[in-house]
Image (tube, rainbow, N blue to C red):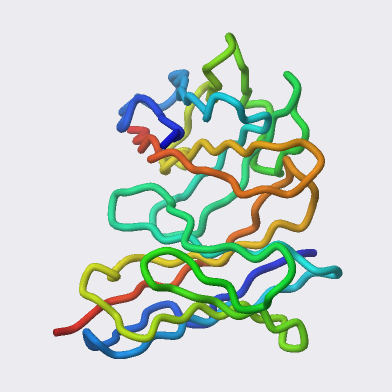
Amino acid sequence: AQSVTQPDIHITVSEGASLELRCNYSYGATPYLFWYVQSPGQGLQLLLKYFSGDTLVQGIKGFEAEFKRSQSSFNLRKPSVHWSDAAEYFCAVAPGQAGTALIFGKGTTLSVSS
Amino acid sequence: EPEVTQTPSHQVTQMGQEVILRCVPISNHLYFYWYRQILGQKVEFLVSFYNNEISEKSEIFDDQFSVERPDGSNFTLKIRSTKLEDSAMYFCASSGTSGRRDEQFFGPGTRLTVL
């Protein structure tokens, strides 16, 4: 069965420091991969997505992610974190065609210290 | 920019009552979804809907739940005889193009509280 693992439940990063959030997936073929961000009390906003092609994808708010097939990973990175980045981050995989379910990881809560 | 909207933002109901959660997907989208997120847990898929019928559903989506597209714009989730454990944030999503994978756009959610 397809699954997504986010090993880190909670991460604290100093403002201005770099960030990497880990995501590993289990899927038999090349998946479509997504990172979503959820601020407290808010909905899910798409940060970036990987469908095919260049394995380094750029997203909004200065985030990027790299797809590594050999490691079944799709880690999210940001070179310099801002206090407004504090939120919950979800990695998700889409195993099927249009109309199939997104499978989410359990999320990583990011706290930013000053 | 087009967006998915959901009403109400917060619904409080008594156990055993029926609730209807409403969503207006992005107007030219073809696929519609409901997900839920129990407090502190991950987002879970409930159901997807295409061409006026359910295309996929999870184990969570039992006979207590139903979905409908009553007109050209709304997409609803009905929960019959609500239980305490139905308390969660319910997200509607929509995606566009048939035949290829596409991103799902999420609404802001409806927080359902069952007392």
Asked which quadrant contains residue B51, the reply is: top right
The quarter holding residue B13 reads top left
- Residue visible at 52% across and 30% down in the picture: B26
As rendered, which of A41 and B106 lies closer to the eye?
Answer: B106
Q: Which residue sits furthest left?
A: A114
- Up-down relation of residue A46 to residue A59 (above or below): above
- Which residue: 67% across, 33% down? B31
Q: Which quadrant would the N terminus of chain B be assigned to in this image?
A: top left
* Rendered residue at 61%/78% (across/down): A56
Q: Looking at the picture, does residue A38 appear above or below residue B92?
A: below
Look at the image and tell me whether residue A59 can be seen. yes
Please, is residue A54 above or below residue B32 in the view? below
- Coordinates of residue A48 in the picture (x, y in percent): 53, 63
Q: Furthest-top residue in view?
A: B71
Which quarter of the rendering shows the C terminus of chain B?
top left
Work out whether residue B7 or residue A31 is closer to the camera in this orientation and state it.
A31
Left or right of B79, for residue B111: left
B40, above or below A56, in the image = above
- Which residue is more in the foreground, A70 or B65? A70
Q: Position of residue B94 (x, y in %)?
A: 58, 36
Disc tally is: 0
The residue nearer to you, when weighing A17 against A54, is: A54
B94 left or right, relative to A47: right
Q: Is residue B62 visible?
A: no
* Residue found at x 48% / y 24%: B24
Coordinates of residue B73 in the picture (x, y in percent) = 53, 16
Q: Where is residue B40 in the image (x, y as percent from the top left)?
A: 40, 60
